[in-house]
Image (tube, helix red, strand yellow):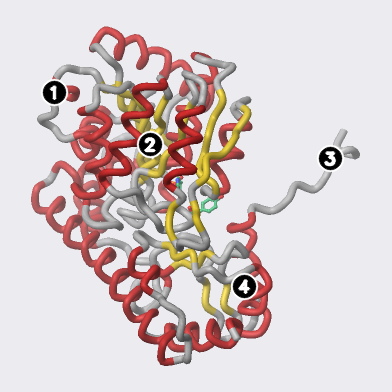
Amino acid sequence: LFAQVEMAPRDPILGLNEQFNADTNPNKVNLGVGVYTDEQGKLPLLKCVAAAEKQLLEAPKARGYLPIDGIAAYDKAVQSLVFGADHAAVKGGRIATAQAIGGTGGLKLGADFLKRLNPDAQVLISDPSWENHRALFESAGFTVGTYPYYDAAAKGINVDGMLSTLKAAPAGTIVLLHACCHNPTGYDLTEAQWNEVIAITKERGLVPFLDMAYQGFGNGIAEDGAVVIKFLDAGLSFFVSTSFSKSFSLYGERVGALSIVSETADESARVLSQLKRVIRTNYSNPPTHGAQVVATVLTTPALRQLWEEELAQMRDRIKLMRTALVDNLKAAGITQDLGFITRQKGMFSYSGLNAAQMQRLRSEFGIYGVDSGRICVAALNDGNIKAVSQAIAKVSQ
Ligand code: PLP
Ligand code: TYF
């Protein structure tokens, strides 16, 4: 039966993790996978999460099947967080939100839903993008193309290239956009550039799909979420996938959501009914624990405040590491302009190093980053930043 099965290629990022774990170098540093570690190099268990779990344990409940679209209080809390509890679209019942299995699950639900709705549409993702974007939409049956994004020479975004590609896209094209903290480059559009994207989207009848995997890691919860409100205020119908993997440090609980914004409440009810069909035929209904934790934190004022503080601490530490990286690289002898490192947002920095240099970092220094030059700034700390900077300086010579 399986004689013809070929070995599938490893996921380039998760594959690096395996390689890292197998490395016996005592000084090894994992800057590959997008995971936040604290000053001690540990994956944090947020205090707000531990407190919510304690609260849930004190009143243990039997675990029946959840509704197909998940815990209602969770869906409502996510909707309030992402779109604002008082927005007319929320109050008017124009948004359908369903609990999903991580942000990846939200993307997959959206992709499957869109395939049923508009099977011949083309999908455009940024060049480059998170590796899984292409794979996800292709596995849902779409042809996936790209719009220009990274401009290596300018150490920024090729905005003209991006906008002209969007302008030329046929109506109905699904455009995957990173709402904040672009993975892998770290470069986000300015507010004025988002306005242009929105204007073209409207004019051309494109279908925006916002991937929000790092809300709160850029400039703040509201600041990072402002893009979503812009799309809402523009009166567009669109998709938002949400991930709490990073913002709650709940990677393994797979907590996410998909929200779909419609023109009317009636339309939204029909959309939700179809979305439930997609969920039912994939995994019937979602799991309980992670979403219950997130819902408890988001809806309990003291825990909510604690979460916002803990998220701000993660965000501020990343920013501190960006500045420290610039200082340490300079101290290690790098003379080129490093301003791009502090212009980038979120967990990642596109360092500009090439694949050969990234491979040297791994083999000679035990420093693991992605061959594209992406490094996870959120895994730097005072204990490893000097060695990392000196190694980067060495391979840059
Ligand atoms: N989208 C982007 C841009 C990501 O970087 C990630 C990271 O894992 C995801 C989606 C998926 O998030 P999750 O781990 O919640 O599935
Ligand atoms: O880009 C990253 O590192 C994270 C984690 O297939 C990740 O988004 C990477 C690859 C993958 C799933 C998650």
Circle 4 sits in a helix, a strand or a loop, which is it? helix
Q: Position of residue 288 (x, y in %)?
A: 35, 37
> Residue at coordinates 18% horizontally, 47% vertically from top-left?
222
Pointer 3: what residue? 5
Label 4 vs label 1: CA separation? 48 Å
| Mark found first going from the N terminus, 3 or 2 | 3
Question: Callout 4, which amino acid?
Answer: Met
Question: Callout 3, which amino acid?
Answer: Val
Label 3 vs label 4: CA separation? 32 Å
The image quadrant that residue 291 belongs to is: top left
Depicted 197 relative to depicted 280: above or below: below
| Mark found first going from the N terminus, 4 or 1 | 1
> Residue at coordinates 57% horizontally, 16% vertically from top-left?
119
Pointer 1: what residue? 88
Looking at the image, do the residues carrying marks 2 and 1 touch, with CB atoms under 8 Å apart?
no
Looking at the image, do the residues carrying marks 3 and 4 touch, with CB atoms under 8 Å apart?
no
